[in-house]
Image (cartoon, rainbow, N blue to C red):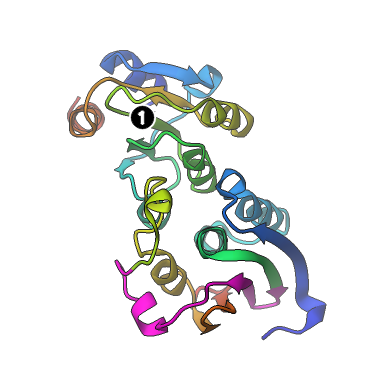
């Protein structure tokens, strides 16, 4: 499933790197502890988090995530979006809680 | 420890510079890709360098990260001048951390850094002198064994 399909079907908002939304998503990971995400997420994952600062871009880029979804209506820092643009990491936002977003993405990917 | 002839690069890391966190890891990852190092090895090296970088930024005044490529392994060495570690055994336990709130707010300081470095290394060495600094060496075998 592409990132674009997830964004459209769940009504998420893309804040950066629309051109990368055609990417295929291979599984996902949810977490706010960056070391946990570094250790346990995989390339191609969609990463769901409540963190908004620019270090999330470093993690997503190093792990080659398909994109990052920031939840709970949190607003990504300006620096985060600038860095994401540079690294080509789509930043997607949602007003839903982390639990809800993860549940919906999971359902869409595996039972949709 | 690998000989100097295998040294590929040295990077400076500044304490408390969370803005640039990840730059050294990205750079090393890029170089390893250029060298044609297998993806599975690069993934391990990326975790090790990132955690080493974050540790220097979080707990040291300054430090260096250098990496070596030998025919059968990659070695990442992190040296810093800073707080050092009082009890290494405790510091290696997952979940143990001395991080302050400013570090934790960023999603760091969960006490997983050193444990991650050890987990993704085939050989791991650490030494530290409290109030002086810390040395960490991680070797990853290219054949995965």
Compared to residue B39, the image places residue B1 above or below, namely below
Sort mark 1 into few (<14), some (14-19) or many (20+) by Cα contacts within 10 Å: many
Q: State the residue at coordinates (48%, 22%).
A: A22
Chain on which label 1 sits: A
Task: From the top left corner, tell me how far across and down residue B66 is, in percent.
Answer: 69, 69
| The magenta segment | B69-96
Dot 1 corresponds to which residue? A70
Task: From the top left corner, tell me how far across and down residue A65 is, in percent.
Answer: 46, 40
Viewer-proximal residue, B14 or B33? Answer: B14
Count of residue discs = 1
Task: From the top left corner, tell me how far across and down residue B100 is, in percent.
Answer: 39, 57
Magenta highlight on residue B95: yes
Q: State the residue at coordinates (38%, 76%).
A: B91
**Quarter where residue A95 is shown:** top left
Q: In the figure, is residue A54 to the left or right of B98?
A: right
Residue B92 visible (yes or no): no
Viewer-proximal residue, B124 or B33? Answer: B124
**Quarter where residue A27 is shown:** top left
């Amino acid at each position: 499933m592409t990132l674009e399909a997830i964004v459209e079907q769940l009504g998420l908002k893309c804040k950066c790197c629309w051109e990368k939304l055609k990417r295929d998503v291979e599984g996902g990971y949810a977490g706010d502890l960056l070391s946990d995400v570094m250790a346990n997420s995989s390339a191609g994952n969609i990463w769901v988090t409540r963190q908004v600062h620019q270090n999330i871009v470093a993690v997503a880029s190093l792990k080659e995530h398909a994109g990052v979804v920031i939840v709970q209506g949190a607003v990504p820092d300006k620096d985060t979006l600038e860095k994401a643009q540079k690294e080509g990491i789509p930043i997607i936002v949602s007003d839903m809680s982390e639990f809800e977003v993860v549940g919906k993405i999971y359902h869409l990917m595996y039972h949709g | 420890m690998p000989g100097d002839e295998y040294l590929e690069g040295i990077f400076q890391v500044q304490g408390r510079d969370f803005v640039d966190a990840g730059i050294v890891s990205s750079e090393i990852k890029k170089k390893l890709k250029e060298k044609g190092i297998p993806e599975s090895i690069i993934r391990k090296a990326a975790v090790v360098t990132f955690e080493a970088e974050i540790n220097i930024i979080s707990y040291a005044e300054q430090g260096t990260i250098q990496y070596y490529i030998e025919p059968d392994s990659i070695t990442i060495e992190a040296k810093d001048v800073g707080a050092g570690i009082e009890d290494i055994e405790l510091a290696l336990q997952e979940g143990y951390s001395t991080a302050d709130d400013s570090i934790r707010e960023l999603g760091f300081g969960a006490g997983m850094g050193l444990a991650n470095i050890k987990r993704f290394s085939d050989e791991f060495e650490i030494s530290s002198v409290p109030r002086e600094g810390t040395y960490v060496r991680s070797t990853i075998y290219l054949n995965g064994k």
